[in-house]
Amino acid sequence: MVLDQGTETVRVNARRTDAFDVFSIQYYVGPNPYLETAATVFDFALTGNTEPLPLEEYIVAVCDRYPHLHEETYPTVAHLFARTLAEVSKLEMDLHFDRWSLTPRSNAVRIAVQALHARTSRSIVYCVWDWFEALTQKQSFDLDDQIEVLQMLFRQSVYGGPTVYALLKMAHELDIPAFYLWDEGLMQYGYGRKQVRGIATTFDSDSHLDSDFTTRKDDCKGFLTTLGFPVPTGKIVADVDAALSAAKRIGYPVAIKPVVGHKGIGVTADVKDAKDLELAFDRAVQAIPPEQSIRVIVETSISGADFRLLCVNGRFVAATERRPASVVGDGSSTIQELIDRANRTVERSDTPTSPLGKIKCDNAMERYLEEQNLTLDSVVESNQTVYLRKVANLSSGGLSIDATRMIHPDNIVLAQDIAQHFRLTCLGIDVIARDLSQSWKSGNFGIIEINAAPGIFMHLKPSIGDRVDVTHHILKTFFSSSTDARIPIITFNRISVPQLEEIIDHILLHHPDWTIGAVCQSAVFVNRSKKNLHPDYNTNVHNLLRNPRLDLLIAEYGEAVLDKEGMGYYGSNLVVLDQPTTSEQMLARDVFEDSIVVTTEAENVSIRRQGLVEQYQLGVHEPLSRVYLKEVATLL
């Protein structure tokens, strides 16, 4: 295998003391000659400067961190390096990266590892390289610190939000194509006319009027009252004096929140007196955008537990109880020490896939502790629970508990009755109830607000209880199968503009109402209309796939683009290979079970469809177009 000790290599990135070298790092946006997914690809070689350890010593160290890797075998250190890289790429956040490959080269091994965010993936390569060099030098290496930095790097990427990534991962599992629209700041699921665009749990099919309506808490409150559902008694005020007057009339405790808002920003519950009200009113005002007038709701504060009911496509799918952040005393530690200890636990790793966020200390927490005659320096008695906030904010360390199976049928009907009135894919309904297993009709139940863009990770990975796979419900709203997310795609390894125009005309003859996108190295077409050609080839491909009217795509992928960028999509329904190179043969690799592959070598033609292969020779001066136009007709 490659990495023979006697092989002469040229040090590119390695230091003089390094045993290994990593060079020619490249990111591919999609399927490429090495993997059928987006990937980071690089060359891995021995430097010859420092003798590496015996392979077994690296295996022992890696498997000490990842014990399940003991079940696999590693013929060379390159295999172990690639496998370790694939494992570290999951960032201990259960990311869906599990594909890798090795390709022997003259003086190195080319390693490809599945990736999503180029910068994070590149940093992971260097992290694993540093780890292996530290092992070689018998030096310590803090992988935990490195992974924490890498997790933050991924979180700051466009894919790092918990809801965005959860939907992206489910799309991957359901084989639904998805890619990020950089100009729009949106995710696209599906191609062409089959597409859906969105950000988090908001999608282009949602009514923006309904979405805006949910942010107007006063109007929503009136609407829910009209439906006959329980909402707290309240009043809208514009200044603190009016708020004090309203609270006196309603009766303490009250809740204070801005009329326009979301995600609990500026909300204070259980305000017990005038002093607390003034502070709560200031918090509500700070949450109001500068361009909007001050309008604050003062309403009855309902006692009970805080629940989020989630509806998808008008149907109830999940319920979660949310509890404020808390600590349990041990008789000797201060509250600050208890918080620090809790924040060091694995459960509070504060990643997009951790069930608990870190407990955040701020002025609101200190004020609430003060109300309880406590400070961060107070020592709490053994087994005494101290709640750190009034509001169950999960992003500040709150606890989520699955309540889906305990909900009373009447409460399910209530949630669905509300959701049916909105053209929204996802609707979150926040309620206060003493017991969700009791009907709302029996009292002790109040609807606090409704949300058009609810977070979903609390349902996917609650701190306590079973997960509810709400991402599956969301994507199944749009796509009953992966086929529903795709349009027909025809891929050539080489095609001229006249040939492209010919095939467009051929398809339009059969389907005159279709919109056909076509791209080759020198032109972009929508039907026979020529469009601007972007210098980045895959941008042209994605510009066509993001066209919401597109019925079919024709694309050319030659060796130069495949070796440099990879493909902008996975899977072709028809592949036409004309004297393909080794790299171009990957186009026949990434096809579906019912796809057709036409290959010519010299004058010989091979047609593969449904597991059968047909072979014949082209006649003298017989163009290849006679072959593939016939297959296009079969495809259509």
Image (cartoon, rainbow, N blue to C red):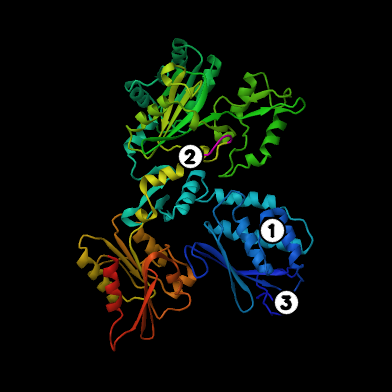
Picture layout, residue 265 above or below residue 570 = above
**Mark-to-mark CA distance, 1 and 3:** 25 Å
Can you name the residue that lies furthest to the bottom here?
620
Disc on res. 5: 3
Based on the displayed image, in which of its 4 quarters is residue 259 positioned?
top left
In the rendered view of the protein, which quadrant contains the C terminus? bottom left
Residue 66 visible in the displayed image:
no
Q: Which region shows up in magenta? A: 463-469
Residue located at (76% from left, 63% from top): 57
Q: Nearer the viewer, mark 2 or mark 1?
A: 1
Q: Give residue 20's position: percent from left, percent from top.
A: 70, 69
The first of marks 1 and 3 along the sequence is 3
Label 3 sits on what residue type?
A: Gln
Viewer-closest of 568 and 476: 476
Taking the image as shown, residue 203 lies to the left or right of residue 21, namely: left
Quarter placement of the N terminus: bottom right
Numbered circle sitting on residue 70: 1
* In the rendered image, the vertical position of residue 585 relative to residue 140, given as above or below: below
Residue at x-position 73% and y-position 69%: 19
Q: Which element carries disc 3, helix, strand or loop?
A: loop
**Horizontal and vertical percent position of residue 590:** 44, 66
The Cα atoms of the two marked residues, 2 and 1, are separated by: 35 Å
C-alpha gap between disc 2 and disc 3? 52 Å
- The answer to which of 405 and 503 lies nearer the viewer is 405
User: Where, by quadrant of the figure, is residue 371 drawn?
Assistant: top right
- Badge 3 crowding class, 10 Å Cα cut-off, few under 14, some 14 to 19, many 20 or more, is few
Residue 386 appears anywhere in the view = yes
Q: Is residue 305 above or below residue 36?
A: above
As helix, strand or loop, the secondary structure at mark 2 comes to: loop
The percent coordinates of residue 215 (x first, y second) are 39, 32
Where 238 sits versus 114, above or below? above
